[in-house]
Image (spheres, helix red, strand yellow):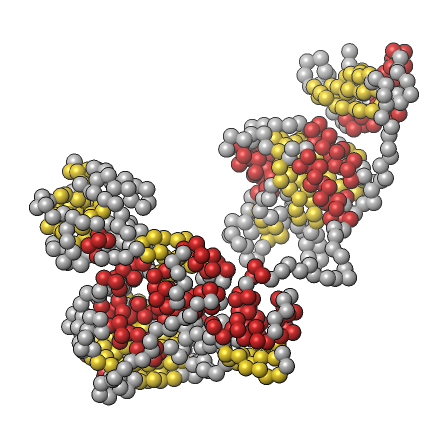
Amino acid sequence: MRVSLAWLNELAPVGFDVDRVRTALDALGLAVEQVHEVGRSLPGVITARVVRTERHPDAAKVHRVYVDVGDGTPLHVWCGAFNMQPGDVIPLATLGTEMPDGRRIERRGILGIDSEGMLCSADELGLSGDASGILILPPDAPLGVPYGEALGWQADVVFELDLTRNRPDCWGHVGVARDLAAHLSVPFRAPDASIGAQGPHRWAPVEIVDGDRCGRFTATVISGVTVGASPTWIVQRLLAAGMRSINNVVDVSNLVMLELNAPNHAYDLDTLGGGGFRIRRAAPGETLVTLDGVQRRLEPRDLLICDAADRPVGLAGIMGGLESEISEATSVVALEVAWFEPVGIGSSAAHLGLRSEASARFERGVDPYACEAAVARFAQLLRHTCPDLVVHEGMADARGLACPSPHRTTVVRVEKVHRVLGIALDAPTIARLLEPIGFTCSELAQDVLDVALPSWRPDCEAEIDVIEEIARHHGYDRIGRVVPKSTVHGGLSPLQQRRRLVRQVLLGSGISEAMPSPFLAPGDLARAGLEQPVIKVANPLVAEHSALRPSLRPGLLAAVAYNASHRRPDASLFEVGHVYPPGGEPLPDEREMVGVVLAGREAPAVVALWREVAAALGVGARLDQDRVPQGLHPTRSASLTNGRQVVGVVGEVHPDVLDAYGIVQRVAVLELDLTVLLTRIPQAPAARPVSRYPSSDIDLAFVAPDAVPAERLDKALRQAAARLLVDLTLFDVYRGAGVPEGSRSLAFRLRLQASDRTLTDREVAELRARCIDAVAAAGGSIRA
């Protein structure tokens, strides 16, 4: 909704301090998205008259326009809009002009013919969002002067408001001004709602067939109409609000809608069969050509405005029909001001793909009792160009079952206001806050008010709605923050604390958290080397992703491939999420897992990471290379087992899987079943004293058959070194020359340190021998 500051000041003296008004609007919940200055001419854009237009045989989408800026020398301009004719006065952006969108107008040619400027639409000048054609200025405007000066425009400021659906009244300037006036403690002046002396009785009868969709329909006959151009101030006001000028009758109709939030429509009475109206639902397949020239195929859900001969002349609440539009020959109009059921209007606008300024207001809710005020304002404004205008007595006023009651009240309790808002307000203070915005308060009992709800606030129905209005006008910033009191104090459960600890360890290791989709395409599991059934989703969000994931690995591998394709080949990612393997009854066996992928790293990296996580959680598991997980390398992977239970996997992704994802590096993988590990009672960590004596490192390389897991050698070394071992690292795995087929070389680094002495060479040599003997017993041999 675009709101003019000058227009607001006609309704309430809110002042012209833009920052003050903007702050007030934001405080009232009428969020200001943008502020525009309008009415000032853009430097370099001047008035010009169209001399002639020509089509070029080789240019289908543009034509040549010759314009005169007042010096008698025609300028040539290429233009893609075709709405101007010789004699029209239009805005011309001359060479060198800086446009609002950042473009600079320069000499550019089409088909070798230069363009000496650009003809401008209202949208290109920042006046409104109308980009349908070139802006046509008044025909008597002087040439070669700034277009704003030629129009006699005044500078103005426009606020673009982001209105929520519970403020339908603020789709009119009156609603915004009423709120601002109350907030700033200035008087509010509603437009004069008196028609004055009326002409002889003449009416356009109305029949409502579908009263559940049309609650009220009024028709007023107005004669003495002369169709022509609108005054400059009306044109400027419409442009500021984002609408273009059509003619004086249509412009006044739009101005009333923008001011009062009262959509209305003027029909040429002489074109109406029977001189009246009939409101009914459309028949299946019935059609109507709307004002935009499009033939609409209608359904029974669409509500039609027909003439008394039952010929459709308008789409109720959305757009009028083409055949009954105002023309230069119109002298008598039938002015419709109505109220239609909001949900039906929204449904029709959606399925027809036709949203208008009127439908935007009707589907949110308008005042059903603003008809008389709208007719009076329409007549007042149209008299500026039609001094002989006559408003006839006998306004037809038909009511349907859907018409809201004019008398709506609710009870507001002072105690409830205090309980909801946390502020102490007495009944007189509440009344002082509500009455300036149209709510009428009377005392029912001690600290209980009976509040009459205004008809222009359909969003207010119950006590809580009125309390929201009290909060807005008391000031959200004046409502203090109160910490809720409860006998139950929040905190993380032990399971939540341990889950957070896992994340901290992984993030501290330089691994980034990823969030792949929990849904998979049918072929994703096979591509990851995982052969298992999946649970299909009956109504997937995306048809291609119709399976619940039984593993985190496909999503993480896809993320690695995506990073590699964007020149980040060494991505380290983890995800904490749920998987859904089939098997549970009646629901799937949902489990929480953590998955880690380290691109460009080998299996020892994730083994070391597993030990970091295990130490933090106080849990343990054995590396079982006899159980190679699906999709992983057969000799560089293992299952993590605790007794007979598999609690995770560790290792490298199988080369075939890497090829399927287009990944050229090795990728190390760690997967842990958090459903099991987070519930384990952690082992209490034992404190070890820090030795002040030097340490000694020894490197030992062993040859072991592929069938002998590295974990077995690791365990043998730890047992042999006992308390003197402070660190053990597998730092190299080698296969090739010098190593028998079917075996590999495993190189370990042992760090030895005593807490009470410096180790002697003899002690280190003896311990080295014990380690070699222990590994030999485990299936390995020292490498020569």
In this image, 162 relative to 722: left or right?
A: left
Q: Which residue is outermost to the bottom?
A: 201
State whether residue 598 is above or below residue 354.
above
Asked whether, in this view, residue 425 is left or right of residue 266, the answer is right
Q: Would you say 342 lies left or right of 775 here?
A: left
**Image location of residue 667, percent across then percent down:** 62, 31
The image shows residue 253 at horizontal and vertical percentages of 29, 70
**Residue 180 picture quarter:** bottom left
Please state which of residues 251 and 648 is positioned toward the viewer in this rendering.
251
Relative depth, front residue between 264 and 594: 264
> Residue placed at 23% from the left, 62% from the top?
232
Does residue 512 appear anywhere in the picture? yes
Q: Can residue 59 be seen in this view?
A: no
Task: Judge whether 102 appears above or below 485 on screen.
Answer: above
- Res 557 → quadrant: top right
Q: Nearer the viewer, residue 654 or 138?
A: 138
**x 62%, y 60%: residue:** 480
- Residue at 36 percent across and 57 percent down: it is 158
Which residue is drawn at the image coordinates 63% and 78% (left, top)? Answer: 447
| The furthest residue to the right | 756
Quarter of the image holding residue 425?
Answer: bottom right
Residue 559's x, y, as percent?
A: 57, 38
**Quadrant of image for the N terminus:** bottom left
Question: In the displayed structure, would residue 283 be above or below residue 582?
Answer: below
Q: In this view, does 130 lie to the left or right of 551?
A: left
Tag count? 0
Q: Quadrant of the C terminus?
A: top right
